[in-house]
């Protein structure tokens, strides 16, 4: 038994609890019955969330002449 190693965990720092929304919410897309997580703040599931493309910086805009 003297050759065994013992690992001890340390506690994490106390912090804020994650924000939660109401229970039993369903995706707002027509015909979708996906139940949303209580931690998902959005009204749609991942499959129906609208795609938003980020603004690309450093790309020159072409000016129509």
Image (tube, rainbow, N blue to C red):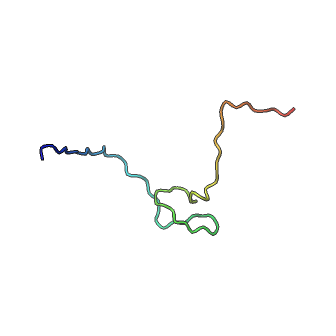
The residue at the point 51 percent across, 55 percent down is 41
Give the left or right position of residue 41, taking residue 3 as reference: right
The residue at the point 12 percent across, 44 percent down is 2
The answer to whether residue 36 is above or below residue 7 is below
Camera-nearest residue between 9 and 2 = 2
In which quadrant of the rendered view does residue 3 lie? top left
Give the left or right position of residue 62, taking residue 5 as reference: right
* Residue found farthest to the left: 2
- Give the total number of marks visible in the rendering: 0
Camera-nearest residue between 27 and 9 = 9
In which quadrant of the rendered view does residue 31 lie? bottom right
Give the left or right position of residue 3, taking residue 27 as reference: left
The residue at the point 55 percent across, 56 percent down is 42
Camera-nearest residue between 8 and 25 = 8
In which quadrant of the rendered view does residue 34 lie? bottom right
x, y percentage for residue 59?
Answer: 70, 32
x, y percentage for residue 7?
Answer: 22, 45
Give the left or right position of residue 39, taking residue 61 as reference: left
The residue at the point 56 percent across, 60 percent down is 45
């Amino acid at each position: 038994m003297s050759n065994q190693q013992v690992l001890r965990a340390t506690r994490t720092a106390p912090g804020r609890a994650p924000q939660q929304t109401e229970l039993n919410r369903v995706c707002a897309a027509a015909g979708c019955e996906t139940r949303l997580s209580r931690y998902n703040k959005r009204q749609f599931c991942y499959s129906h969330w609208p795609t938003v493309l980020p603004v690309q910086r450093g790309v020159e805009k072409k000016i129509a002449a």
